[in-house]
Image (tube, grey):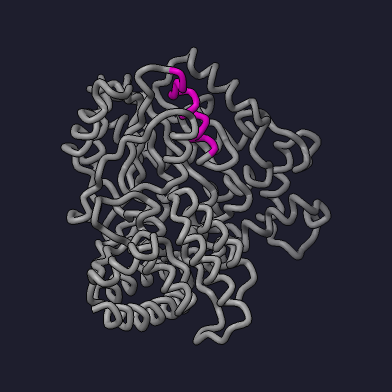
Amino acid sequence: MSEPWPVQLCVMLQCFKRLQQQPACRRTLSALGSLYGARKPYNTVIDVTWGDIHRAGVKPLSFVRQVLAACLDPTLLNSDKLPADARQRAQRLLGGCVGGSVGSYTATAGISEIVHRISEFITRRDGGVPSHPENIYISPGSQWALTNILKILVNSKSAPQTAVLTPLPCHSTTTLSITSLGAVAIPYNLSEEQGWALQMEELHRALEFAKGVYNPVALYVINPGNPSGHVQSRKSMQDVIRFVSEKRLFLLADEVYQDFVYGEHEFVSYKRVLAEMGPPFADTVELASFHSVSKGFTGEGGLRCGYVELVNVDPAVMKYIYKMFSMDTCAPVLGQFALDLMLNPPQPGDPSYPLYNVETRNIKTAVANNVKRACEVVNGLPGFCCQPVQGGAFAFPRLYLPPKAIQKAKEMGMQPDTFYCLRLLEETGVFASPGCEYGLKEGTYNVRFCILTPEDTMEELLGRLTSFHTQFMKDFS
C-alpha cells in the first residue's frame, strides 16, 4: 500500500465534516482502520481524488527538473551532466534573481523577466492579442490569486449581501473562498444532458433568483470544466461576455486546465474571445483569467505558482490589487521558474527538445487513451452514464443507484454517492470523490475520478471499478 494515501483520506474526512456528514466521517475512519493489518484483494490504493499528475504516477518532465536542479545547485551550471540548454536556462533564470539566488525575495508581481515572458506567451496563445506585463501578477497558485481578487469584489458588510454566480457542479475550494469572505455563491446549473454545457437561460435564472435578495458582482466560469470536463465553444463564450456586459458583472475565468483538451475540441481563452468581439465589449468588460503551473504537463503543484491577468480594470482598483498582492511578499521563486519553463519549453533544435517532445507526447497519448477507455468502460456498466470528457483532468459519470442503495445510505446518514465511494474504497482500494462534494441537482448522483494517470493505472482502476460496480448493483437490486 503506498504511503501517502492516508493523508488524502484525512482530506476526504475534512470534506465530509464540511458537509456535516458525521456518519460518513466515522465510516471513513472505520475504512482506514480496516485497510491496515487486514487482508484485502488488493495491495495498493489508487487515489484519483486529485487532479495531480505526479500524485497519479506520471513522471516529472526531465527538462524542468534539470533546470531547477541547476538553480538549486549552481555547481551544475558548469557540469556536462546536464544538457547545455538546461544549464543556459538556469543561468538566465538565476540572473533575474537578486543576488543570483533562489533564496531571495522577488517583486510583488513576480520576477520582472518572467512576468514579461508570461505576457509574450499570452500574446502567442491568443493569436497576437496584446498582453501587458503590468496587468499580470504571479501568485502562490491560481486559487490564491482568485481569492485575492474576490477580496476586492466582496464587501462582507454590505446589505444586501454580495453574491458571485458559480457553476453547479463546481470544485468546493472556490465556493468555500466565496463564503469565507462573507459572500454567497449563487449556483447556475450546467446541463449534464448536453455534455455539461453552460446554458444562458440558467445564468438569467440564477441572476433573477438573486435579484432583490443579494448583490451579484461577478460570474465565475471554469473552462475546461472541473469536475464536468466540458470545453466551451466560442459562441458560448461570446454569449457569456454579452451577459456580463449587460448585467455589469466582473468575469472570473478559471482556465487552469487549458493544456488538457481532447479530440476535435480546442481551448480558446476568454481574453481572446473578448478582444475579437471588439468594442464596446473589448473595452469595457472586466476580466480576470487564471492559469497554474499545477495543472499542465509540468504538473508541479507542490511548487505553488500561478498567475492572473487582469483586463479593463480601473487604474485605481489596480493600485489596490497591488497592495493586496503585496501582503504576502511574493510567490515561491522555484514555482516562478517552473511557470516560466511551462510557458516557454524547449524548441526544435534545442538539445533538450527530443526528450521533452517524447515525454509530453507520451503524456498526451496516455491521457487521450484514458479518456477513451474510461468512457467506454463506464458507459458499458449498468447504472452508469458518462458524458464525453472534452477537457480537464476528470471523468464525472452519473450514477443511477438502486432504491435499496439509496435507502441504505440514508439509514447510515450519508449521501448515496458518498456511500458508494466509501464502499468502493473499502472493497477495492479505489479512492474516488462523491459528486455531492461539488454540488448537484437534487436526486442526482455522480462520481469524480482523475484521468491524468499512467495507462496501466487507469486499466487497473477500471478493472476494479467494473468488478465492484457489478456486484454492488446485484447486492442492492
Residue at horizontal 70%, vertical 36%?
96
Answer yes or no: is residue 99 visible.
yes
Residue at horizontal 37%, vertical 51%?
438
In magenta segment, residue 149: yes
Q: From the image, give the main secondary structure of the stretch colored magenta.
A: helix
Front in this rendered view, residue 35 or 465: 35
Q: Image quadrant for the N terminus?
A: bottom right
Where does the magenta region start and end?
Answer: 144-157
Counting from the top left corner in percent of width and height, residue 387 is at 25, 62
Residue at horizontal 56%, vertical 77%?
34
Counting from the top left corner in percent of width and height, residue 212 is at 25, 20
Q: Quadrant of residue 254?
A: top left
Counting from the top left corner in percent of width and height, residue 297 is at 50, 58
Q: Is residue 197 above or below residue 58?
A: above
Residue 198 lies left or right of residue 419; in this view the side is: left
In magenta segment, residue 306: no
In this view, which residue lies farthest toward the front? Answer: 411
In this view, which residue lies farthest toward the right? Answer: 75
Counting from the top left corner in percent of width and height, residue 232 is at 27, 46
Front in this rendered view, residue 55 or 127: 55
Q: Image quadrant for the C terminus?
A: bottom left
